[in-house]
Amino acid sequence: VKRSIRVQVADWLAVSPAARIIEWTNGILSLLSVLMYIIQDLFDAIDSELATAQEYMNLFFAADFLLHLYAAESRSRYIFNKYVIVDIITIVPTLIIFFFKVTGNSGQRTTMEILQSFNFLRVVRLIKVQHLVLRENNNAREYGGPNVRRQLIGALIKFFVVLFSFAGAYLTIENEFAPTSMLKRRNRGRLTIIDCLYFVATTVSTVGYGDLAPLSVPGKFLVSIMIMTALAIISDTLNQIVTLITSQSPFARDSYSPSGLAKHVVVCGKFDSTSMSEFLSEFFHPDHGSRDQMCHVIILGQDTPDLTMRALLDDERFFTHTKYLEGLVMMDKDLERARVEQAECVFILT
């Protein structure tokens, strides 16, 4: 059956190496777009080369958006995806400004530049980088396993996105709507993104030094929403991060460090406490002489040892000469933790 062009494009976007490069390019340019937004705000000027680079980046984002829109099975569902909505909000104003510049019509440029200030919302697109990294290294183990790593990265990105989004929104609203009379009374000039990040961090952490405060009605409304959101999201995210870091298996963080003249072997493969007990009993049997008695056995297993396996590792016959490491034999960093290159040999149990 001949497939339609749309289906072929969708399949190409799903499995093609070139499509993966496009996705990585999209993620990197999204990060650069945020950094350029910060630079432009801090220096209170838009360099012509920087502005041109931003326009070309948005043309790339627009092309990527249209390509995925064409390949989507349900275009209406795709358009209402929350990340696509952010794309539309940040791409369309810049493209309209670019159109006015090309055609020589600058009458609406001020309005469009105000809309373009919401470019900070592009930080939400950095969540795509998380999925790309985890897909490239799907079996990687860090802090106990791929699932934990996914949760930890997701929690950190969510924390950063919420803080930065509120800071950018507060920056835009206060600089646009704060009354001039109150600015003079407070002897306060134009806010920068650093000021707003500082304000958001001190506010959501309930420190609140009071040196910065919203002067406009929309700003006060935004801060009220921000505080309620912080109680619901940021506190939960911080607790999740702390829990993920402190509650992981020590076997996934441990590594073997050779000492002195001691040699070691690595044991991996498919085993349980019974087969490992038989192996260790045979390996350390007195009939094998003193050489094997001085050798260390490094066990590399993909699961956290259960109570029976831990009891075996604590057995007085093996306690001083065995170490269990949680990891995967297909991962270079786990093999390095077990010092496989320095091992006398590797036993693969089946």
Image: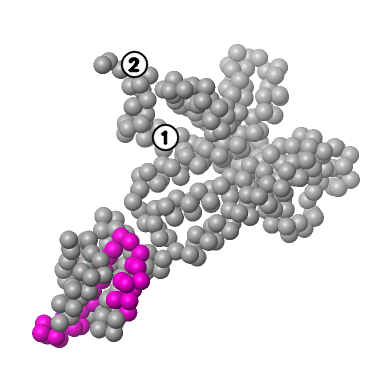
Quarter of the figure with the C terminus: bottom left
Looking at the image, residue 150 sits to the left or right of residue 300; the answer is right
Horizontal and vertical percent position of residue 52:
55, 28
Looking at the image, residue 40 sits to the left or right of residue 323; the answer is right
Horizontal and vertical percent position of residue 107:
71, 17
Horizontal and vertical percent position of residue 218:
78, 37
Residue position for label 2: 4
Q: Quadrant of residue 315?
A: bottom left
Residue lying furthest left = 287
Q: Quadrant of residue 46?
A: top right
Query: In the image, which disc is placed on residue 138?
Result: none
Choose between 178 and 71: the one closer to the eye.
71
Marks 1/2 in contact by CB < 8 Å: the verdict is no
Q: Quadrant of residue 206?
A: bottom right
Residue position for label 1: 23
User: SS for tag 1?
Assistant: helix
Query: How many residues crowd around disc 1 within 10 Å: few (fewer than 14), some, or many (20 or more)?
Result: some
Q: Label 2 amino acid?
A: Ser
Q: Which residues are magenta?
A: 286-314
Can residue 154 be seen by looking at this rendering?
yes
Q: Label 1 amino acid?
A: Glu
Looking at the image, residue 20 sits to the left or right of residue 266; the answer is right
Q: Can residue 288 be found in the magenta stretch?
A: yes
